[in-house]
Image (cartoon, grey):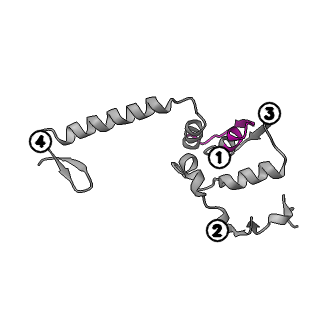
Amino acid sequence: MSQLALMPEITETAHGRANSVANRLGEDDRSIHDWYRFVLSFPPHLVREYFQRFGLGAGQTILDPFCGTGTTVVEAKRRGLTAIGVEANALAHFASSVKTDWSIDPDELLASARGIAAATLSICFAPGWRRRPGNRCAKKS
């Protein structure tokens, strides 16, 4: 029994890259896909290649029944496709939910991050605390 290749012309490489290289994240994908790496995830460029080869475009719908951390759903969303992702693993589901929620206001997020940083620094300089190498704070013993 032999396995039928989904795309026979890409059996060993993707865009002329060895599989070990083809499975790595591109630099332009890191901001969305690299904050939580799921071992079984597809690289985004592979998902984009499949969308292109299958002729998928804006207004169409894709179902990913094992969406993991949402790579396919994110890439679909970036291209104007409607995407439905299903995931049973609670941690992977949480990661995909966070990656696909683009309703967050970047200015509000930045303001919150600055507030947390300021509060942390005020603790580091408070009596009874000392700064350690690497700007880490530790309670004086």
- Return the residue nearer the eye: 65 or 83: 83
Disc 3 or disc 1, which is closer to the eye? 3
Q: Amino acid at mark 2?
A: Ser
Distance between the alpha carbons at the discs numbered 3 and 1: 19 Å
Give the mark nearer the N terminus: 3 vs 4: 3
Tally of marks: 4
Q: Residue at x 19, y 49 (%)?
A: 131
Position in image of residue 65 (x %, y %): 73, 41
Q: Are marks 4 and 2 in contact (CB under 8 Å)?
A: no
Q: Are marks 2 and 1 in contact (CB under 8 Å)?
A: no
- Return the residue nearer the eye: 137 or 56: 56
Distance between the alpha carbons at the discs numbered 1 and 4: 45 Å
What is the magenta range? Answer: 75-90
Marker disc for residue 128: 4
Image position of 28 (left or right of 17): left
Residue that numbered label 2 is attached to = 20
Position in image of residue 78 (x %, y %): 68, 40
Image position of 104 (left or right of 12): left
Residue that numbered label 3 is attached to = 59
Q: Residue at x 70, y 68 (%)?
A: 17
Give the mark nearer the N terminus: 3 vs 1: 3
Q: Is residue 38 visible?
A: no
State whether residue 125 is above or below residue 53.
above
Residue that numbered label 1 is attached to = 71
Mark 3 burial class by Cα count in 10 Å: few <14, some 14-19, many 20+:
few
